[in-house]
């Protein structure tokens, strides 16, 4: 997954260099480029506004500590960050659950459900990071189609693009997202 | 329907009955095309499950549900890019934690090179302040607590703070235990000498710290420390 379009590949390279050097500035760069993504993911995973700040803090600290381990060949930075955020979110949720009556059974089920839920959520937020990296027109078309619920014809009317262009870019955007997903190792 | 447009119509369910039948015929006849359609349908399925907050983030906006609450007393203002002002309380805390994590090593290094003396009275000696990662590599400084209870701080080879920025000296243990001592500027010479009464015994804190602050960033520690040395406390 390329860097979100609003930051650019150069910013991404700078960020990765800072992470690998253990440079404290990496935390600020990560927060600047991916803070909204991480905060959004954690807000949905935790449903607790106060906890989001705490877990985001733990995530950023973990990111800084593990920065030298990041391998761009294995996953995009957004995915790597989301995986760390997911781990910290699960830790938080695990701490919050009261002790089960039968730790061997209930805890295992609770953990599995939690892992499944946050795993699905992670996939959705991975996609979010990828949409942010699409060409602007394609991202806009997807938003109008899948968020605002417009048909391709209505999108053409709204944007002033020819209907054929809307249709072509819709398929291109889906293909591009598919390609980004395929380039990363399965989680 | 030209090119791949029919596929988009099919995936989104925006085709006429006759187009749907034609699309199905094409897919039935071509396993590779069928596999491609299935993989794109999976992407479309995930897109349709994204939350409003996710779409806000994808559009480069801060989702309302996850935006950090403004700090008490903070005025709403137009977004202005400020280089050293952390974007959120979480980031501030992490930056300070990171700076401290780095500073422990630096502090230990300075201390081990300082003759190995410890215990009471150590704050009366001069301690070296060493540059932290991210600061100018050859910057240096020293801090000395005078018998009159004043801090005599000396810095050299620091870059000029620049417009809208200044340096601040602190007594600090961690992000919750710190006290500002004095603001100062470094101009072209890279040097500054500051003598200031200490508001608390230096030994109650672990470090003498010098940070680079922005005028617009408030009075809290910016989390951008440039020099640090142990108080011996």
Image (cartoon, rainbow, N blue to C red):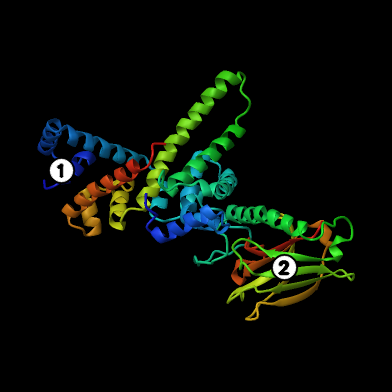
Residue B20: x and y in percent read 14, 36
* Residue in front for this viewpoint, A129 or A1: A1
At horizontal 61% and vertical 61% (from top left) the residue drawn is B133
Identify the secondary structure beneath mark 1.
Answer: helix
Measure how far apart labels 1 and 2 are at the Cα level: 67 Å
Residue A53's tag is none
At horizontal 41% and vertical 61% (from top left) the residue drawn is A10
Chain identity of mark 2: B
Residue B120: x and y in percent read 89, 57
- Crowding near the residue tagged with mark 2, few <14, some 14–19, many ≥20 C-alpha atoms within 10 Å: many
Which quarter of the rendering shows the C terminus of chain B?
bottom right
Identify the secondary structure beneath mark 2.
Answer: strand
Residue A184: x and y in percent read 37, 42
Foreground tag (1 vs 2): 2
At horizontal 56% and vertical 54% (from top left) the residue drawn is A22
On the image, numbered disc 2 is attached to which residue?
B169
Q: Quadrant of residue A100?
A: top right
Q: Is residue B198 left or right of residue B110?
A: right
Q: Where B71 falls versus B77 (above or below)? A: above
Q: Where B194 falls versus A164 (above or below)? A: below
On the image, numbered disc 1 is attached to which residue?
B6
Does the image show residue A57?
Answer: yes
At horizontal 59% and vertical 76% (from top left) the residue drawn is B162
* Residue in front for this viewpoint, B31 or B72: B31
Circle 1/circle 2 CB separation < 8 Å: no
Q: Is residue B164 left or right of residue A80?
A: right
Does the image show residue A31?
Answer: no
Q: Is residue A175 left or right of residue B71?
A: left
Q: Quadrant of residue A21?
A: bottom right
Q: Quadrant of residue B73?
A: bottom right
Q: Is residue A112 left or right of residue A99?
A: left
């Amino acid at each position: 997954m390329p860097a979100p379009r609003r930051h650019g590949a150069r910013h991404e390279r700078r960020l990765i260099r800072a992470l690998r050097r253990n440079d404290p500035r990496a935390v600020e760069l990560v927060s600047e480029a991916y803070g909204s993504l991480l905060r959004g993911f954690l807000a949905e995973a935790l449903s607790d506004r106060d906890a989001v700040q705490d877990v985001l803090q733990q995530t950023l600290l973990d990111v800084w500590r593990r920065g030298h381990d990041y391998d761009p060949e294995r996953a995009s930075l957004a995915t790597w960050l989301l995986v760390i955020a997911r781990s910290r979110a699960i830790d938080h949720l695990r701490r919050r659950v009261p002790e089960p009556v039968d730790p061997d059974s209930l805890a295992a089920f609770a953990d599995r459900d939690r892992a499944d839920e946050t795993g699905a959520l992670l996939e959705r937020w991975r996609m979010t990071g990828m949409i942010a990296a699409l060409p602007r027109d394609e991202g806009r078309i997807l938003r109008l189609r899948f968020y605002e619920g417009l048909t391709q014809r209505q999108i053409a009317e709204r944007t002033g693009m020819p209907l054929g262009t809307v249709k072509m870019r819709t398929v291109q955007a889906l293909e591009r997202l598919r390609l980004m997903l395929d380039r990363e190792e399965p989680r | 329907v030209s090119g791949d447009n029919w596929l988009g119509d099919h995936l989104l369910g925006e085709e006429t009955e006759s187009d749907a039948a034609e699309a199905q015929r094409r897919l039935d006849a071509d396993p590779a095309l069928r596999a491609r359609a299935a993989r794109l349908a999976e992407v479309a399925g995930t897109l349709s499950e994204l939350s409003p907050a996710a779409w806000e983030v994808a559009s480069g906006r801060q989702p309302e549900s996850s935006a950090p609450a403004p700090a008490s007393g903070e005025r709403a203002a137009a977004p202005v890019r400020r280089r050293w002002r952390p974007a959120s309380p979480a980031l501030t805390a992490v930056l300070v934690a990171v700076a401290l994590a780095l500073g422990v090593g630096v502090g230990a290094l300075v201390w081990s090179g300082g003759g190995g003396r410890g215990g009471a009275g150590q704050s009366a000696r001069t301690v070296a302040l060493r540059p932290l990662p991210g600061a100018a590599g050859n910057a240096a400084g020293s801090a000395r607590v005078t018998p009159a209870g004043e801090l005599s701080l000396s810095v050299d080879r620091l870059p000029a703070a620049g417009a809208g920025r200044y340096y601040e000296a602190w007594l600090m243990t961690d992000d919750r235990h710190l006290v500002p001592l004095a603001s100062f500027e470094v101009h072209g010479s890279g040097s500054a000498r500051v003598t200031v009464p200490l508001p608390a015994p230096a030994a109650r804190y672990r470090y003498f710290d010098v940070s680079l602050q922005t005028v617009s960033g408030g009075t809290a520690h910016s989390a951008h420390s440039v020099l640090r040395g142990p108080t011996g406390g």
